[in-house]
Amino acid sequence: MTHVSFLDPYQPRPSPVHHLDPRVKLILTLSFILATTLIAPGAWPIYVLLLALILAVEIASELGVGFVWRRSALALPFVGAAVPIIFSARGTALFSVPLGPWLLTVTQAGVERFISILLKSWLSVQAAVLLASTTTFPDLLLAMRGVRMPRLLVAIIGLMWRYLFVLADEALRLLRARAARSSQLPTSGRQGGGSLAWRARVTGGMAGNLFLRSFERADRIYGAMASRGYDGEVRALSMSPLTPAAWLAMVLGLLILSLLVVLSYLL
Amino acid sequence: MTQSLSVNLPHQPAIEVVGLSFAYPDGNHALRDVSFTVLPGEKVALVGPNGAGKSTLILHLNGILRPTAGTVRVHGLEVQDGNLKRVRALVGLVFQDPDDQLFCPTVFDDVAFGPLYQGLSEDQVRERVAEALAAVHMSEYGSRISHHLSVGEKKRIAIATVLAMRPEILALDEPTADLDPRARRGLIQLLRELPQTMLVATHDIRMVAELLPRTLIMDGGKIVADGPTEELLNNADLLAAHGLEK
């Protein structure tokens, strides 16, 4: 069987972070990202404290700091979108760069803000990587339901995750079938694979094929759901209440984060 | 599992199909005037070449597809809008591709799905899940993620998802397709243990001979033979005429 499992970011470890209630993890991760976003630009000591906080969790999770940093680096190129702020922010000019007919002035406030955005993105992505690596997806879905996300939305995310793998497996089989028939004769003197237009047509055909298969599968899945009584309403078993320890972890986490945000403006 | 047979009405056939015809929206006449009766507790095979209408027929048993003409009754209940929920509680449909049947994140969620929609209490749902997983010998699998199971394991869980609803009738589409010999053997053993009335659409003639005493042969949307399995399988001309091999 062809099988795709590299899409699943969960890394099983016996750490306390893995064992923490997924609802608490989801709330704390979102709060961490919110707090990081709210912190004043240029309040460097607070950034160090936030980094220390996330590093502590990374070490406690037994995933290793290197692992989380490698994964979080993937999101860094998107910070490129913030580059213009170096030139557009008003403030003390540091130096100017002539670019064709324009003169780009780098300001101190601009640089400060850019570095703040860079750090904020990096910290936020680390928190997200931690959440996804220490919580199984079914647990994440439970957590989303636990924090009162609309049930239909959670059900759709769940179906998407379930069939993403099935679809990826199907795509893999199609690619393999194409590869198996993409040969080249030594005597033809022409390069195998045909022209770009021809290859584009093959790829388009494969995408269409995949779409049709998904469409038919959706029909069959709905049949299977209806067979077992699905009536359009999303139902689920209720969840056990949070333990006192989980409450404590959540309240403590939220307090620390609020404190850091307030401090960043006082400094 | 024996209590699931307790609501049997003594003189009602489990499945009663009369003059059933069905055409898909594209005009393909998949079923033409199909009639047959299955008594409670009977184990019936549904064989025939691809495109004979086996899967289409099975999808009529709980109203996923509706007849163009004719009627389907399950334990005396006509399969129609007002009765759908009760019919679906009586008929457990197991689809050919377990990836269609297992649409929840975990095995537990999938097996709990049917009981949850039957309106049972949470304790009852948990009890049903434990009972159904035990019936397919997969009690340890509750927290597993469906995608990571083997095909044989998925097929067993797919059967558990309908057993949890305590159906009177099991309708299975190609239960042994895609299985290696050991998984196939295990599945046949499992089907032998289940007490429900059974209608099994299959190409696996050896399983039919072993497990299902009565056989319906379909071809071109019609039932062309209905009788004891042993008799039909010994009729070489009949089998050859409908592309079947013993």
Image (cartoon, coloured by chain):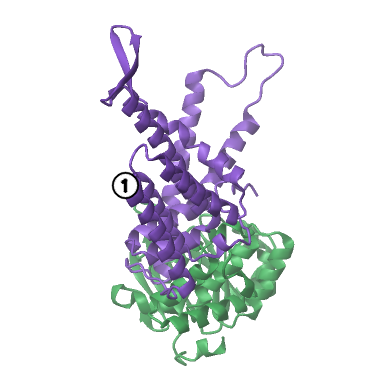
Quick one: which residue is furthest to the left in this view?
A90
Quick one: which residue is furthest to the top in this view?
A101
Label 1 marks a residue whose chain is A
Chain for colour green: B
Q: Amino acid at mark 1?
A: Leu
**Residue B47 sits in quarter:** bottom right
Locate the C terminus of chain A and report the quarter of the image it occupies: top left
Position of residue A97 measured from the top left corner of the image (x, y, whole percent): 36, 12
Residue visible at 62% across and 32% down?
A179
Position of residue A135 measured from the top left corner of the image (x, y, whole percent): 52, 58
**In the displayed structure image, the side of residue B18 where residue B144 appears, left or right:** right
Which one is in front, B48 or B182? Answer: B182
Residue B37's place in the image compared with B97, above or below, is: below
Q: Give the residue number, with chain letter if any, for mark 1.
A: A266
Chain A, colour shown = purple
Residue A264's place in the image compared with A146, above or below, is: above
> Is residue B97 in view from this perspective?
no
Quick one: which residue is furthest to the right in this view?
B182
Residue B126's place in the image compared with B22, above or below, is: below
Residue visible at 49% across and 81% down?
B166
Which one is in front, A60 or A178? Answer: A60
